[in-house]
Amino acid sequence: MQTIEIVVVDRHDLSRYGISTLLSRSPGMMHVLGVFADVQSAERQLFEHRAHIFLLDDNLPHSLSIEEIIKRLHEQHPGLNIVVLGNKLNPRYITRLLDYGARGFIYKQDNMEDILIPAIKVVRNGNPYLSPRAAALFYANRPLQRDDGLNNSDLSVLHLMEQGYNPQEIAGQLDLTPRSIYRIYGRLRQSLNVRTNEQIVDAARKKGLLDEVT
């Protein structure tokens, strides 16, 4: 498998160190080309070396907006996959970033240790990625006009199941009790006409429910 080449831009020293440490846990699979505090320095690296993933902090001191930075990076480096490391959780804001060409959005308050490497793999494989709280936010803001008996909480749980979270972790992400999560599992099994929790995600994919994430 080809090594994923990554460039990181984050204004905070601790964040840069933490991200580099997490990525170093996948030697041979991921390689950090450079870690920078500003976009200009990172762009010089991009002109010298081809990167697959560009992790971009959205709270940088710069004259351009984050949307303009994403647009410029796409124009100058076709094929570059930009994943925004977000400091604010707002569905309109996230949608705007995706419209400008970002391939993913990771909310910094999500558990970076668990999601960073899977997120990079998802984006590298050509798929969009939203971290758990960002994805749940989109579900929470959707009107309830469904005919399958599922509600927004059910869809949020479904998305987190796809990401590999267990019931206790899902409960923590959505501020629900584990008992509530198991009740939702029951609704999902009934709606999808499956017998076990392990069958839920595959059945949801076949039904197209997971396409609703973005």
Image: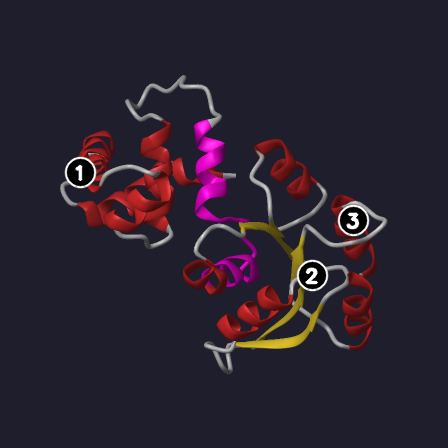
Instruction: Give the amino acid type for the residue marked by disc 3 in the picture.
Output: Lys
Going by the image, does 51 lie left or right of 202?
Answer: right
Per the image, the residue denoted by label 3 is 71
Going by the image, does 109 lie left or right of 10?
Answer: left
Q: Residue 179: give its label.
A: 1
CA separation in Å, label 2 and label 1: 40 Å
Q: Are marks 3 and 2 in contact (CB under 8 Å)?
A: no
Whole-percent x, y for residue 42 in the image: 76, 68
Whole-percent x, y for residue 13 in the image: 64, 68
Q: Residue at x 36, y 46 (%)?
A: 160
Helix, strand or loop: magenta stretch: helix
Looking at the rendered structure, the secondary structure element under dot 3 is helix
Nearest to N terminus: mark 3 or mark 2: 2
Residue toward you, 78 or 158: 158
Query: Quick check: can you spot residue 2?
Result: no
CA separation in Å, label 1 and label 3: 44 Å
Report the mark closest to the observer, 1 or 3.
1
Instruction: Give the amino acid type for the residue marked by disc 2 in the picture.
Output: Arg
Whole-percent x, y for residue 2 in the image: 55, 77
Residue toward you, 153 or 213: 153
Residue toward you, 93 or 210: 93
Q: Residue 176's quadrant in the figure?
A: top left
Q: Residue at x 78, y 73 (%)?
A: 45
Looking at the rendered structure, the secondary structure element under dot 2 is loop
Query: Magenta part of the protein: which range?
Result: 118-140
